[in-house]
Amino acid sequence: MTKDHIIVVLKITEQCNLNCSYCYFFNMDNQDFSDKPALITDETLQQVAGFLANAAAQYQAKTVTIVLHGGEPLLIKKNRFEEMIDLFRFQIKPYAELYFYLQTNAVLLDNEWLELVKIKNVFLGISIDGLEQDHDLFRRDKQNRPTHKIVVEKIELARALLTDEDSRSGFGGLYVINPDANAQATYDFFVNNLELNNLHYVLPDFWHDNIEKAKLNQVNTYLLDLFSAWTALNGGNNVKIRFLDTAIKSLIGGRRYITDQLALQNNTVAITIRSDGEIAVEDQYRNVRPDLFNLGMNVENSTLPVFFETPAIQEFLTEIQSLPDDCQGCCFKNVCRGGNFLDAVHRFKSGRGFNNPSIYCEAYRNLFTHAIQYLLDQNVTLERLMEVLYDTNSNTVISV
Ligand code: SF4
Ligand code: SF4
C-alpha cells in the first residue's frame, strides 16, 4: 500500500501561555491534556522520528509534513527546537521530502525565533482574530490580559524578517471567524494594515449538538461579506484565503481538479501525535470522538499502517469519507462534498455521527452561488460550471 503524503500534527507541548475562551484544546469537554507531559521529552522525539521515517518508507511517501503544535509550541527551548528539526531531517529526509509548519500565538516570538524558523525553513502560522476589540474578546493570557497589541508587534517583526522569497519559509495569519465581527473591516485590517497575503480563515468549532441557530445566520452573512471584500480587492488575486481558493478552484477546475483533489486527499494520511507519543486521529475531532484519542497506540510500540488498520479507525474514516444521506440530492455535492471542503467536524451529531450535512450547509450553498456568479462575471462559461456540478462520474467518496 502506498500513500503519497503523511501529515502529522505534533504536540510538542500540551500547555499554553494563553487562555483563549474558545480554545478547542483546553476549554472544551476533552480535558485529556492534563494526563500528558507538558513538554515532549527527547526520548519521545527520537521515537517520533523513527516512527515517521518508518511510515515514510512503508508507505513510500513523497512528503511528510510536520505541523509543530501545542498548546503553544514556542514554550519549548530554542536549542531543543533546533535539535528536534535536525533530528527529523536526519531520520526522515532519506525517505521523503520534509516540510515544517509551526502554529503559534506569537506572544513569545522574538528575533531569535524568527532567525531560527528562517534558517530551518519552517513556515509560521500566526493566530490573530482580526481587530483589537474582536481579538481581545477571546484571546487573553492567563492573567486575563489582552494580547492583540503584542501579536500585531510580532507580525510586524515577522514581516521584516520573513518573506515569501525565503524558499518555503514565510508566514501567514490564522483567524477563527467571529460571526459577530465586521468581515470587511477585518479583511481590510489583515490586508492593508498587517499586509498579510496568506490567510487561513477557520469556522468556529461548533457541530449539531452545540450550535446556536442565530450564529448560523451570522456565519452566512459573514462568509458572503468576506467573499465580496476578497473579490473587490484586486479581484482577490494577491491575497490567498485558503477555503475561498479551494471553493473557486473546485468550481472551475472541472472533473480533473476534483479528481486531483480526491487523489491527493485519498493519498494522504493525517494524524496527531501527542506529547507522550500517543497516536490519534486529526486534532479537530478530539471533542466529538475522544475515544479515538485514547486507543493505547504509541509511536514507541506501533506503526502508522497498523494504526490505520485498526477497526475503530477504519470505521471512522469510512464514516467521514461517505457523503451524508441528506447531501445526495444537493447540486453542490461535487464541490462541497458534504461540508468536508472545510471541515467534517461540523457534520457531527451525537447518536448520528457524521451522517449529516454540515451545520454551515446554508452558508456554503450561498457562498457557492455567489462564487458561481463571480465566475460567470469573469467569463467562465456556464457549460464549464455545469460540467463540474453535474458530473455524474464525479467520485462522491469524499475526504477530509
Ligand atoms: S493560544 Fe491556541 S492553544 Fe493556547 S489557549 Fe489560545 S487557542 Fe488554545
Ligand atoms: S453540506 Fe449542504 S451544501 Fe454541502 S453537500 Fe451537503 S447539502 Fe450540499
Image: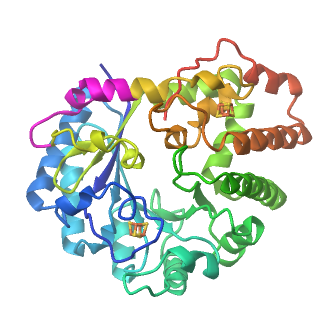
Q: Quadrant of residue 182?
A: bottom right
- Horizontal relation, residue 289 to residue 22: left or right: left
Is residue 93 among the parts visible in the rendering? no
Above or below residue 380? Residue 212 is: below
Task: Tell me the magenta residue range.
Answer: 299-316
Residue at 43% across, 75% down: 106
Where is residue 62 shown, x and y percent of the image?
36, 34
Q: Quadrant of ligand 2?
A: top right
- Horizontal relation, residue 306 to residue 348: left or right: left
Is residue 319 among the parts visible in the rendering? yes
Where is residue 104 shown, x and y percent of the image?
41, 68
Residue at 57% across, 63% down: 175
Q: Quadrant of residue 280?
A: top left
Where is residue 348 shown, x and y percent of the image?
49, 39
Reply yes or no: does residue 313 show up in magenta.
Answer: yes
Above or below residue 61? Residue 105 is: below
Where is residue 299 shown, x and y percent of the image?
15, 43
- Horizontal relation, residue 164 to residue 223: left or right: left
